[in-house]
Image (spheres, grey):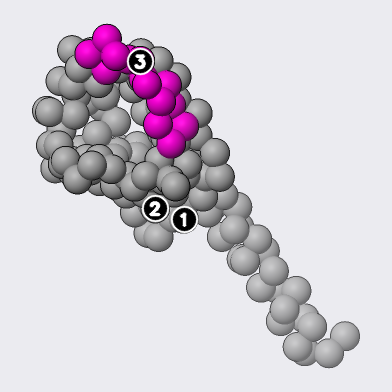
Amino acid sequence: MNKTIICLLALLPLFASRGMAQDKEERSVSAAVESLRKAMVDPDKAVLDKLTMEELSYGHSNGMIQDKQAFMDALVSGKSDFVTIDLSNQTVRVVGKTALVRHILSATTNDGGKPGSTKLSILMVWQQQKDGNWRLLARQATKVP
């Protein structure tokens, strides 16, 4: 075998392990997104607190921006009431200790007792903590035409 092929074969495990680590992190982020989805449908303040950072900036498609406390209060009080949330076309990109998540959110709502539905394009920014858990730092929604 020539030296180039031997070098490439020697480096193959390094690239494969990096890819597997990236896949593992992407799966971990996706699990955090799913936990948040469930906590938004069936609000649990402790779970919401664990999944979000103190510095949370939660942007709605109408331009309203909530901090962590306002985000949690709206869900727990029922002011913002998601009956169902379905996520589709999700992509996860991990860059160091930061993850960018994009997806389409389709939901049925019952905000203030008023039934409705929404379809939004979402960008989330997650940050990996020292304990290895991912927490939401920012979220922005735009309406899907």
Q: Are marks 1 and 3 in contact (CB under 8 Å)?
A: no
Q: Are marks 2 and 1 in contact (CB under 8 Å)?
A: yes
Front-most of residues 18 and 48: 48
- 119 left or right, relative to 17: left
Q: Which residues are magenta?
A: 106-119
Find residue 122 and report its horizontal and vertical position in percent: 38, 45
Q: Element under label 2?
A: strand
Amino acid type, residue under disc 1 in the picture:
Arg
* Residue at which label 2 appears: 100
* Residue at which label 3 appears: 115
Q: CA distance from mark 3 to mark 2?
A: 31 Å
Residue shown at 46%/55% (left/top)?
93
Point out the image quarter for the N terminus. Answer: bottom right
Q: Residue furthest right?
A: 1
Q: CA distance from mark 2 to mark 1?
A: 5 Å
* Residue at which label 1 appears: 93
The answer to whether residue 114 is magenta is: yes
Residue shown at 23%/42% (left/top)?
62
The answer to whether residue 26 shows anywhere in this view is no
The answer to whether residue 144 is magenta is: no
Circle nearer the N terminus (3, 2) = 2
Amino acid type, residue under disc 2 in the picture:
Leu
Find residue 132 and report its horizontal and vertical position in percent: 35, 40
Residue neighbourhood size for the residue with mark 2, other residues' Cα within 10 Å, grouped as few (<14), some (14–19), many (≥20): some
